[in-house]
Image: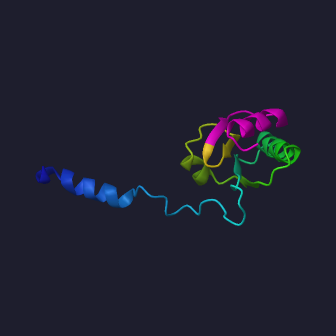
Amino acid sequence: MRLFGIRKDKKAEKATYPCSTANDKGPAKDSGKAAISIKVLGSGCKNCEALLQNTKEAVSALNLTADIEYVTDMRKIAQYGIMSTPALVINGKTVSMGKVLKPAAVQDLLKKAGIA
């Protein structure tokens, strides 16, 4: 097996892809509540901005404190495996892509995620 370099590739794979998430900062621990991280992924078009606005409305209607980030860098968007924008990511999980959600739909997704 060593002749073809298979063993060497396995060692390199372990070194390249650690199982821990040491690069992630993780949720903020300033209070007893879990931090809410919401990301709207898009190219900067009007649909993406509409989803961002609807997300802000949904969060304020539920009286939540959330870190809402608008990501327009295509390299970062590609890391999420998004094939169409706009997309909505709640606490690191992609919950919607390719749709402009109404505030009520965003509220439903937040409730399904166990946040609201």
Q: Position of residue 107 (x, y in %)?
A: 79, 37
Range drawn in magenta:
94-116
Observer-nearest of 21 and 71 = 21
22 above or below 66? below
Residue at x 29% of width, y 59% of height: 12
Q: Is 98 left, or right, of 12 in this rendering?
A: right
Image height of 15 relative to 106, above or below:
below
How far across and how far down the image is residue 105, in percent? 78, 33
Displayed quadrant of residue 106: top right
Residue 100: in sight, yes or no?
Answer: no
| Left or right of residue 2, residue 96 in this image | right
Query: Is residue 9 placed above or below 95 in the rendered structure?
Result: below
Specify the quadrant of the image occupied by residue 27. Answer: bottom right
Q: Find residue 90 and report its horizontal and vertical position in percent.
A: 67, 45
- Please say whether residue 33 is visible from this viewpoint: yes
Quadrant placement of the C terminus:
top right
Residue at the extreme front of the image, as rendered? 32
Q: How many marks?
A: 0
Residue 74 within the magenta-colored segment of the rendering: no
